[in-house]
Amino acid sequence: MGCSGYDEVGAVKHYKKGLDELTKEDIKAHIDTMQSQPFVNLWTLAFTAPPASVLISENKLIASKNQSIANDNQSIASDDQSTTTPIPELIHHFTSLLYRVVPIVVWLVQLALLIALIHSTTNNDEEYEICPQSRAWDIKFAAAAVGLFYFTRMEVKASQLYAIAFRKPTNGRIIAGDSLSSFAPTFDFWYSQTFEYVTMFANLFFIFRSADSVQGVILRSVSFRFIQEMDDKYVRASLSHPIISRYIISMDAMSKDEPRLKKKMYMYGAYGFALLPPLLAIAFSIFLAICL
């Protein structure tokens, strides 16, 4: 997990060696790149979480720097010198465990909510017709508008996926999280994209099965949007964490594996996710406008 094959000392050395190849400017650029790529999601965060040894090393380094500053500045009050005391190692072990467990908890909650919502829709609506044509025109209009809104979101995601095939490194390698040796980036690539599109189409299906007012259409879309964004918000928050992002970047920088984007199955997968869902969204919007 993140540093398999390394003892605690080896993990710290491996982490620092990866950071030595990067500059402060590189860190920010690589974080932006990872956020725009489909390879770093909940499972990658769990399997590439910083081990306790790295957290302990970072804390000791900060404490040492603070102590040096305090020693150089004799005007600092003695009670403020407590800030240079390292955090107990047990806390670092507990924090490292949380970094590994919480992303999986978010993944389970997100999946469970989607399954429960879809089950509730299909289980409670017994009178189902393929094309009832019984809704009022304003409900049809609102449902078609939601479908077109999803088309715009899919088009943005599709353009990002399509563009990654043409991305060329300009100054060294590109850190995108797709060279990590764990299976997690592969799982995240296929699962996260599939889940997002399934959530969108499930929302459209949910509207088709149970929409009874314009307000109902909008509120149902908000509920699915909440579920859809759970993983994205957690990933963005994690990548803004200085130690988590630095550790993932250093592990990717030190990886000897070939970037997944160079492999045909990922390139064709990106093209498939880029082209098919937007076309289906247009078709579903037309279907909603006609058959509701």
Image (tube, helix red, strand yellow):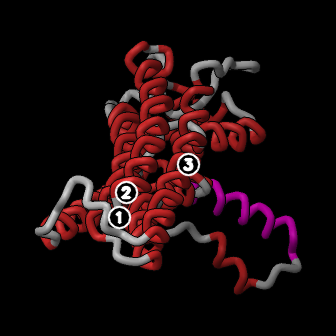
Secondary structure beneath dot 1 equals helix
| Residue with the mark numbered 2 | 204
Q: Is residue 2 visible?
A: no
| Contact between labelled residues 1 and 2, with CB atoms less than 8 Å apart | yes
Determine which residue is flagged by label 3: 153
Q: Which mark is residue 207?
A: 1
> Does 60 lie within the magenta span?
yes
* Kind of residue sitting beneath label 3: Arg
Residue at x-position 53% and y-position 59%: 145
User: Disc 2, disc 3: CB below 8 Å?
Assistant: no
For the residue labelled by badge 3, is the local secondary structure a helix, a strand or a loop? Answer: helix
What secondary structure is found at the residue carrying circle 2?
helix
Q: Residues within 10 Å of mark 3 (few under 14, many from 20)?
A: some
Residue 106 within the segment the image draws in magenta: no
How many numbered marks have been drawn onto this rendered protein structure?
A: 3
Q: Amino acid at mark 2?
A: Leu
Q: CA distance from mark 2 to mark 3?
A: 14 Å
Magenta part, dominant SS: helix
Query: Residue placed at 58% from the left, 47% from the top?
Result: 152
Q: Which residues are magenta?
A: 57-74
